[in-house]
Image (cartoon, rainbow, N blue to C red):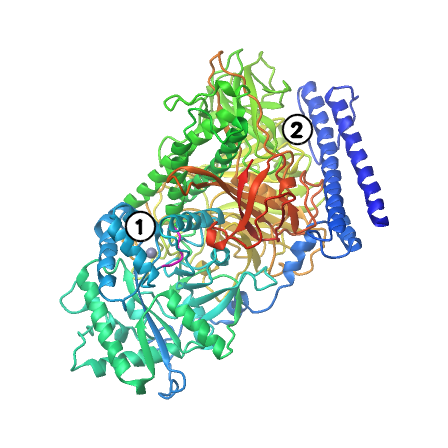
Amino acid sequence: MKRGRVLAVLVGGVFCLAVMSLYRMLDLMQGTEPRGHGDTPVGQVDEVSLQDLSRLQEKIDRLELLLKNNNRLVAKLRDALFQHKSLETGRGGANDSSDSAHRRAGAFPGCRLAEEMKNAADGVQLLDVYDLLRFDNPDGGAWKQGFEISYRSDEWAEQPLELFLVPHSHNDPGWLKTFDRYFQDQTRHILDNMLLKLGQDSRRKMIWAEISFFSKWWNGIDEQKRAMVKRLLEAGQLELVTGGWVMADEANSHYFALLDQLMEGHQWLQTHLGVTPSSGWAVDPFGHSPSMTYLLKGAGLSNMVIQRVHYAVKKHFAQQRTLEFQWRQSWDSSSRSDITCHMMPFYSYDVPHTCGPNPAVCCQFDFHRLPGGRVFCPWRIPPQPITEQNVQERALLLLDQYRQKSRLFRSPVLLVPLGDDFRYVESSEWDAQFSNYQKLFDYFDQHPELHIKARFGTLSDYFAALHRRLSTSETILPTLRGDFFTYADRDDHYWSGYFTSRPFYKRLDRTLESTLRATEILFSLTLADMHRFHGDGRLAAGFPAREHFQRLTMGRRSLALFQHHDAVTGTARDPVVVDYGTRMFHAILNLHQVLQSSAHWLTLLDKSQYHHDQSKPFFQMDEVISAHDALPQKTPLTLSDEPRSLVVFNPTEQLRSSVISAVVDSPDAHVVDAETGRPMAAQISAVWVEPGQVSTEAFQLSFIAELPPLALVTYHVTKASAGATPRARYTVHRHGNSASVLSEHFQVSHLEGSEVNAPLSLSNRHLQIWSSQDTGLLQKLRLRSGLVRQVQVQFLWYGTRTERYRDKSGAYLFLPGAEGAQLYSSSEPPLVRVTRGPIFSEITSCFRHFTHTVRLLHLDGHAGKSLQISNMVDIRSEANRELVMRLVSSVASGNRFYSDLNGFQMQQRRTLEKLPLQANFYPMTSSAFLQDPMSRLSLLSAQSQGVASLRPGELEVVLDRKLQQDDNRGLGQGVTDNKLTASVYHLLLEDRGGGAQEVGGASVEHLSLLAHLASLSLCHPPITMVAPSDSQRPKLGRFLPLSSSLPCDLHLLNLRTLEDPQEAQSPSQEVALLLHRKGFDCSSTPEPLPQCTWSVHEEVNLDDLFSPLRFRLVQRSGFTLLRDHDEQDSAQQQSPRIARLRPMEISAFRVQID
Ligand SMILES: [Zn+2]
C-alpha cells in the first residue's frame, strides 16, 4: 500500500511536469518567446537566406525538443501507471518485482527484451556448417552430389519401412506462359481429372499447393463437382498444402507480402472449403528463409517440406541424418517458433530424384515416361509397364532405392513425392502412375518378408506417421537455426542473379505493397469512421464499399501473385513479365481509387457534403504511373491566389517530419497548414529536364510536413509574391569546369578559387559529408559525435564468363568473368550538380548509365540523420553487363556483414574465400549493415536486390543486369527487357561508442532503433493527394485517428478488412489487426532520442495504444485469422485489453473498430 502511495505521488509529479511543458509549448507557439541560440551544427552550415525562416526554424527546434521531453515524460507516466495497475491487480503486468522493473525503466527500456534473445544458441547454426564444409564437389557415383549408401536387408525386420508416395503437380502461376494461359492449357485439366481419378479409387491421393489456380478452377465448376471436392478433402484423399496464393519466393519477397498471400489463400480456403492447411510444401523456391517458416508456424502449420538447398549442405545433412529437423528462429530462445521440416535429399523434385539416390533407376518408375509418350528418360533406360512377369524384379529394384533413401533418415517412415511441373494433365497419365504403382504396392503387401508397407499418401499422412514413430522410439529431431541461401544446384552455379533480375519490377512490387498497406489501413479506418458517424452501422450514402472491397481484393491478389517464385524473382518469359507488370499497374490504379474516396470522407469537415462520383474522383494522386513499365511522375499543379489543397497521408504509426515535394507552375509558392494557417518552411528547387537544363515552366516545391501517425493532413498551397519562397542555389560543373546553365529563376554559380580543387561538402545538424569534386560521389562522413568514417561510393561493372562452352550469367545465375568487377569509367566525366537549400541539399552526378543523388535533409529529427541515396539506372545499351554500387568504408567489419531476410530479421553473413565470388552474394530485401566496435554503417533499401561484402568494410548492391543468354534452367531466354529503373536507399552511420565486443558482431543482431525508423519511412512514404482547384470546394480538415505514436519498436503491419462471411465480396465489420514488435540493437543510443516511446513490458494495453480508437470484440488468432486458430480464452469483450507482444514476434487479432 505504501509503495502504491509513493507511486501515486510520482505519477502526479510527472503529470504536472508534462502539463507545465505543454503550457510552455503553447506560449512558444504564440510567439512570445524571445529568440535564443540553437545548437551549433558541425562544419559549414548552409545559411538560410531569410530571417523569418530561421526564426521559424528555431521555434520548431525548441518545440520539437519540448515535445520530445514530453513524450519521454508521457512514456514514463504510462509505464508507471501500468506498473501501478499491475501491482494493484496482481495480474497482467510484469511478473517480477517493481524494483527491478524500475531499474529497467531507468536504463534503455526495450533493449533488455531484445538483448535476451541474443543468448539463444542451442541447436545447429547453419553458419557453422558453412565454416565446416569444403565445397569441393567430389563425384559421388550414381548419386553424383552425394555418396554410396549401403544397408543390411534385415534392418527393417523389427520396424518395417513405411512408405508414402505423394502425387503432386507443380503449377507455376506464370513462368513460360502467363497465369491464365497455364490455367487454360493445363491446370484446369489437371484438376478436372483429379476429381475423376481420385473418385475412382479411395486409395489414391493427391496434394495441391497453389490456391490462385485452385480458386480460379473452383469458380468455374458446378455444385456437384464442388461437393465432390469437399468429399475428397474430408476423406483425406486430397490435401491442400501450405494454402498460400502462390508458392512464394523466399529471397525477394517482403514479409508483408509473404503473409498477405498466405492470408489470401487461407481466407479463401476457410470461406469456400472450411479447411485449414497443416503442412507446408515449397519444392521450387530458389533457397529457403526462416521468415517463411515463422509465418507458416504462426498460420497454424506444424510441418513443412523444402527442396532447393545447396547440394553440399544436402549431402552434409544426409551424412548426419539431419534432413529432418526442428527449424527454429535464430532469435528465439524458446521452442515456440519450431516447425518440423523435411529437406528433400536429392537434386530435384521430379521422379528421377525422389525415389532414391539413383536417377537412372528412379526414372524407370515415372510411368508418364513410358515408351511412346512425349517425355522420356535421359538416362536411356525407359520405364516398363508393370506385369505379372516383371513385377518381382521391378519391385525389388525400386525397394533397393527406397531402402537407400531411408538410410538418410532417422525414422523408417519414408516420403517419396511423385510428380513434376504441370503433371497429370491427361487422364492416361493418371492411369499410368496409379495402376502401375498399385501393382507394385500389392506385390509388397503380398511379400511381408520385404518389410515394407507402401501406399499413396498426402503430406499429413506422412507427417502423422513420422511423429508417431518418432515418439514411440523416443527420437528427438535436431534443432537448426539459420537460412538456406545462397542456393547452388550444381558445380559453381549459384542462384544469386535472381536476387536482382528485372529490378524495375522488384521496385514496382514494393510500390504496390506500400500502396496496398496504406489503402487497407485507410479503408478500414474509413468504414469504422462511417459506422461511428451514423451510429447505426450504416455507411455513407453512395460510398461504394463493396466495389472498393473488390478493388482491395484485386490489389491483394495482384501482389500475392507476384510473390510467386518466377515472378518477383525476375525469372519469367518477357510476355509473362508484362502480364505481371500490367496486373500490378492496374492494382495500383484501383487502390488509388479506394484511397481517394476514403480520404475524401475522412477529411471532409461537413460530412453531409460527401458524394461519390466514380467518373470524377474528388482527389487526384499527386504522383501517377502512366503504364506498367513507366516510373511514377508528379502531376504539375497550377497555382493561383486561390489555395490548392494538398492532403498528405502518413501511412506509418509514427509522428514524422517529412519533406513533401510537389511540382508547381510558379517559382513562388506559399504553403500553410489548412487548419491552423501556420506557414510551413518551404524551398523551391529546379526541375531538370536535362542534366544541365532547367525547366522554365515547372518547379519543385518542397516543404516540411509534421505528420501525426496514420493522419491525413491538409495543406493549402498558393502562389506567392516574387522572392517569397527560399530557392535552392546551384553549382554545376564537369571536371572542375563550370557548365553553362541558363536559369532565370535560380542562382547558378561557378566554382571559384579554392573551390575548384576542394572536395564538395554538405552538412546539417547531425552530420557532414564530403564528396569528390570530380565525380560528386560520396567519400567521407562525420557525425556530430566526432565519429568519422570513409565511405566511398563507387560504381562497377561485372561481365560474364567469356569461355565459349562455359555457362554464362542469366536470369537465375550470376557467373561473373574471372576478372571480377571493373571500376565504372566513362570517356566523359560526369556533370555534377550541387543543390543547397534550407530544406534539403544534395549532390547529383549524371553519368551516362546512371544518375546518382545523395540528399541531406535539414531536419532535426531522425530523418536528418540518414543520407538519402537514389539511383536512376539505364543499361539498355549494354550487353552481358551488370552494374553495382559499392560502398568502400573504413568500418573494420572483417569478413562479416548482415543482410535482412524478407525485411523481417537480420541474418549474419560470412564472406568465405573458399567459395566463388557469386556464392558470396545474398538477398537483401530491405537492409544490410557492416559494423565494428565503434560504428555501424546501415544501408536501407526500398527494393530487393543482391548484396555482398567481398572485402572488409565493403558493401555492394547489384543495380541492374542485362544478359543476352539463357542459363539453362528452363527459361529459354536471357534478360534483356531492361528499363529505366529507380532504386532508393537511406544510408545511416551510427556511433556505437565502443559498446560492442565482438568484431563484426554476434550471430544474432538487429537493426538499431533509428535504422528501423528510417526503413519505415523509406518503405512507407507519405501519400499526397490533390483536391480540385475549384473555388466551391468544400472545407477539408485533418483526420487524426491516433492521439500518439505507437512505441518505436511496434509496427502496425496491417489493418485489413475481412470479407463478410454472409455476403461474398463485401467487407465485414471485422478487421485483422496485425502488429509486429521489432527487435532492435542497443549498442547505439540515438541522440536526441526519437520522438516515440517504447515500453519495457511485453504486455501492452491495446486500447491505450490505439486511443482514441476503440476496439469492440478482440480475438487473438493465428496470423491468417482462421477461426480454427482463434486462441481459447483470449477473446476480450471488456477493457483493459492487455495483449502480450513479444519482441520479434507478430501478433494477429480479429477486432471490430468502434
Ligand atoms: Zn516453379
Q: Is mark 2 on a helix, strand or loop?
A: loop
**Residue wearing tag 1:** 213
Front-most of residues 607 and 253? 607
The dot on residue 415 is: none
Region of the chain picked out in magenta, as a range: 240-245
Q: Does the magenta stretch include residue 242?
A: yes
Name the residue at 54% across, 17% down. 1035
Locate residue 68: give its quadrant. Answer: top right
What amino acid type is highlighted by mark number 1? Phe
Up-down relation of residue 199 to residue 508 (above or below): below
Q: Looking at mark 1, is its residue's CB closer than 8 Å to ligand 1?
A: no
What amino acid type is highlighted by mark number 2? Asp
Considering the image in quadrants, where does the C terminus appear? top right
Q: Main secondary structure of the magenta part?
A: loop
Q: Can the viewer see residue 88 in this picture? A: yes
Task: Pick out the residue farthest to the left.
Answer: 372
Residue 793 % position (x, y): 54, 44
Front-most of residues 110 and 268? 268
Q: Is 900 on the left or on the right of 263, as rendered?
A: right
Distance from disc 1 to disc 2, alpha carbons, whole Å, reads 58 Å
**Residue wearing tag 2:** 46
Front-most of residues 633 and 854? 633
Residue 325 % position (x, y): 48, 69
